[in-house]
Image (spheres, rainbow, N blue to C red):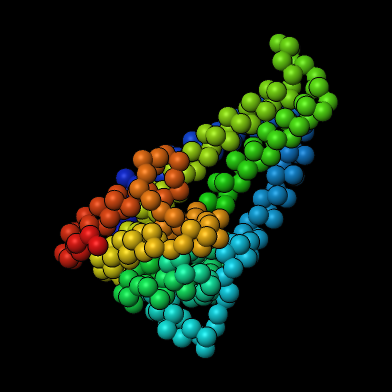
């Protein structure tokens, strides 16, 4: 099955494109201010940022695997999981990604890798033990859609510049505290102006990145429904993961909380109204969208667990 057969949510795509454009415009303004206030040569700025971006882009998968404690396993170690991933990857017209298992009882999964050929799909032991095979397929199809859409690369690039803004904010504050700093035309210390601009850039870009992340979760849910042809599988999995999360000891949840942005549902999930500051949409909205897709496909809509 070719990826174009999945269909596209044009409303979602247009909103995500507009958000990415706004984020890009924000970064352009930020670096214009950076060059003018600090009198830093544009070549130096590009060189420094390029080196940092190169490092982050090519090491993001290794960092994610190491942070989660995931171990890449072969077909002989997890034959059923490998067979499931291979079949779904073929249905999604993707190269088979590497497969990893996370030694955690928190039911969850994530995908990482800078490209489709370098992708890794990781599942926790808790997900494998607690979900039914058809539910695991729904989760894996969601993660493979992230791979197909190159979401890891997109989010790495999108988040990189906000990280630079945060670093500059710290350097500006520390530099001003220890050196006193020169004053600009209006009398304000340059370090204070740089600190304020960096903080403002970081906050706005962070909110835009959260918005992009939520859009891409919706897109991955949609892709999973269309790959498997059974939206109810992912719906059941999401409900079960959210339900089982409340039964996991807090210490276990904290151990994997650093991977929340990658997981299909953040560890320690709970109902919250702070959607603006979340990497994932509310579960209720995700289920509602999947229910709509299920009705369009003539599939059954499961009763909430």
Compared with 63, 136 (above or below) is below
Quick one: quadrant of the C terminus? bottom left
Out of 50 and 207, give the one closest to the viewer: 207
Residue ranking furthest to the bottom: 76
> Can see residue 6?
no
Q: Count the labels in the image.
A: 0
Q: Residue 135: percent from the left, percent from the top? A: 32, 71
In this image, 52 relative to 91: left or right?
right
Out of 282 and 226, give the one closest to the viewer: 282
Query: Would you identify the image quadrant in which residue 190 lies?
Result: top right
Compared with 216, 121 (above or below) is below
Query: Would you identify the image quadrant in which residue 138 lies?
Result: bottom left
Quick one: quadrant of the N terminus? bottom left
Compared with 185, 105 (above or below) is below
Out of 137 and 14, give the one closest to the viewer: 137
Q: Residue 86: percent from the left, percent from the top? A: 43, 79
The residue sitting at 63% across, 43% down in the picture is 163
The residue sitting at 41% across, 57% down in the picture is 265
In this image, 5 relative to 38: left or right?
left
In this image, 103 relative to 39: left or right?
left
In this image, 15 relative to 22: left or right?
left
The residue sitting at 52% across, 34% down in the picture is 204
> Can see residue 205?
yes
Q: Residue 25: percent from the left, percent from the top? A: 54, 34
Compared with 64, 178 (above or below) is above
The residue sitting at 17% across, 65% down in the picture is 300
Q: Residue 131: percent from the left, percent from the top? A: 35, 72
Residue ranking furthest to the top: 186
């Amino acid at each position: 099955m070719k990826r174009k057969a999945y269909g596209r949510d044009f409303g979602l795509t247009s909103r995500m494109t507009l958000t990415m454009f706004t984020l890009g415009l924000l970064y352009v303004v930020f670096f214009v201010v950076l060059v003018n206030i600090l009198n830093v040569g544009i070549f130096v700025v590009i060189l420094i940022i390029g080196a940092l971006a190169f490092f982050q882009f090519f090491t993001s998968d290794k960092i994610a695997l190491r942070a989660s404690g995931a171990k890449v396993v072969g077909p002989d170690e997890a034959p059923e999981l490998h067979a499931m991933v291979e079949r779904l990857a073929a249905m999604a017209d993707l190269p088979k990604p590497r497969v990893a298992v996370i030694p955690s009882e928190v039911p969850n999964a994530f995908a990482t890798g800078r490209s489709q050929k370098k992708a890794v799909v990781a599942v926790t032991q808790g997900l494998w033990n607690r979900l039914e095979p058809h539910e695991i397929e729904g989760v894996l199809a969601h993660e493979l859609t992230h791979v197909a859409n190159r979401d890891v690369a997109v989010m790495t690039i999108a988040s990189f510049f906000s990280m630079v803004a945060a670093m500059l904010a710290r350097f500006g504050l520390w530099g001003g505290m220890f050196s006193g700093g020169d004053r600009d035309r209006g009398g304000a210390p340059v370090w204070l102006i740089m600190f304020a601009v960096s903080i403002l850039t970081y906050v706005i870009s962070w909110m835009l990145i959260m918005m992009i992340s939520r859009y891409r979760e919706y897109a991955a849910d949609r892709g999973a429904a269309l790959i498997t042809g059974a939206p109810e599988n992912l719906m059941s999995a999401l409900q079960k993961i959210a339900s089982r999360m409340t039964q996991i000891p807090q210490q276990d949840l904290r151990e994997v909380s650093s991977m929340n942005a990658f997981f299909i549902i953040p560890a320690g999930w709970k109902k919250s109204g702070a959607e603006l500051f979340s990497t994932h949409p509310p579960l209720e909205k995700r289920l509602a969208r999947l229910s709509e897709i299920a009705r369009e496909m003539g599939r059954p809509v499961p009763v909430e667990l």
